[in-house]
Amino acid sequence: MSGADFGALDAAGLNLQAVFDVDALSPALAGRLHAQVDPARRFRQLILIGNAGPALWHAVHAAGMTTPDPIDDFSVRCVMRWLAARWAGVAVHRLYPGDVPIDLQGLGRLAGWHHDSPFKVGIQPGWGTWFAYRVALLADTALAPSAPLTTASPCASCTDTPCIAACPAGAMADGGFALDACIGYRQRAGSRCATRCVARMRCPEGAAQRYPDAHIHHVYAHSLRMIARYRERARAAESGRD
C-alpha cells in the first residue's frame, strides 16, 4: 500500500481526509455497501473527504462557482480531478453527494473527526463545529488506511454550556435535543435561526475557524428550504390518505 498525497485537496480547502479498507469496516456497514452498490466487490477502499474552517468557501468563490450547489459541485470536481491525476482509470463509485444512504457521522466517528455536541452538529478540538463531510466514495485504490484521530470531545470539559443557554427554541433545555422545537422555531417569521444556528455561533471551540458569514447563510438557507420541501411532501402525503 502507498500513502496518498492530499496536497491538492488541502489547497482547495478539502483538508480532512480519511481512507478505510472496506473489509476492515464493521460487517454491517461493509455488508450494506456490498449489497447496495458493490455486489461484485470491485472496490477495496472507502475514501472520506471533508473540509474544516473557512478555506473551502474562499476556494469555491475563487473558482467562480455559480451552480445551485456550489460547495458540493466544487468538492466533487476537486476530488475527481485529484483521483484522475494520481490513479487514472481507477474504478470509483461516489456515495456522497448521491442517492445512496450513508451514515456520514458514523464514518466521521471512525475517522476520529466527530464528537457529539448538544445541538447535534459534530465537534472536534481546534475546529469546533466548523467542519463538514463533502465527498465519500468507494475506489479500487491501495492506499495506506488512515489512523483515526484520538481526541477528547471539547464538550466534555465545557462547564458553561453557552450553546444550551443561547438556543432561542429551548431545544436542549431538558438535557436532550428536541428536533421539532428546533425546526419549528427555524420556520417562524423573524426567526433568529433561519440562516444560522444561534447555539452553534455561541460555542467557543474553534471560534477562530468559523465559516464566513456568506458560507453560514448559504448552508442554513439551503437546509431551511429542504425542511420546507420535506414538510410540504409530508402534508401532501397525509392529505392523500384522508
Image: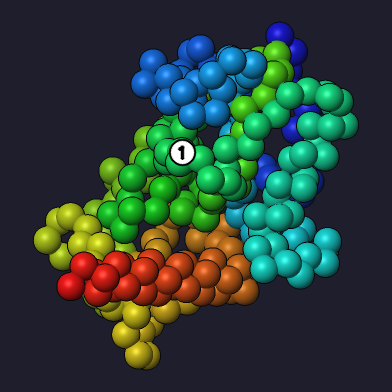
Is any atom of residue 154 visible in this view? Answer: yes
Q: Is residue 99 left or right of residue 140?
A: left
Q: Residue 51's spot in the image, x, y percent?
A: 62, 48
Identify the residue shown where x is 70% and y is 14%: 142
Q: Is residue 58 visible?
A: no
Where residue 82 appears, as percent x and y from the top left, is 80, 36
Mark 1 highlights which residue? 102
Q: Quadrant of residue 79?
A: top right
Residue at far bottom of view: 190
Instruction: Report the side of 179 relative to 224 (left or right).
Output: left
| Amino acid residing under circle 1 | Ile
Left or right of 14 in this view: 126: left
Q: At 56% from the left edge and 22% from the top edge, which residue is drawn?
A: 38
- Residue 231 in the image: above or below residue 89: below
- The quadrant of the rendering that contains the N terminus is top right
Q: Position of residue 95 (x, y in %)?
A: 57, 38
Residue 182's place in the image compared with 124, above or below, is below
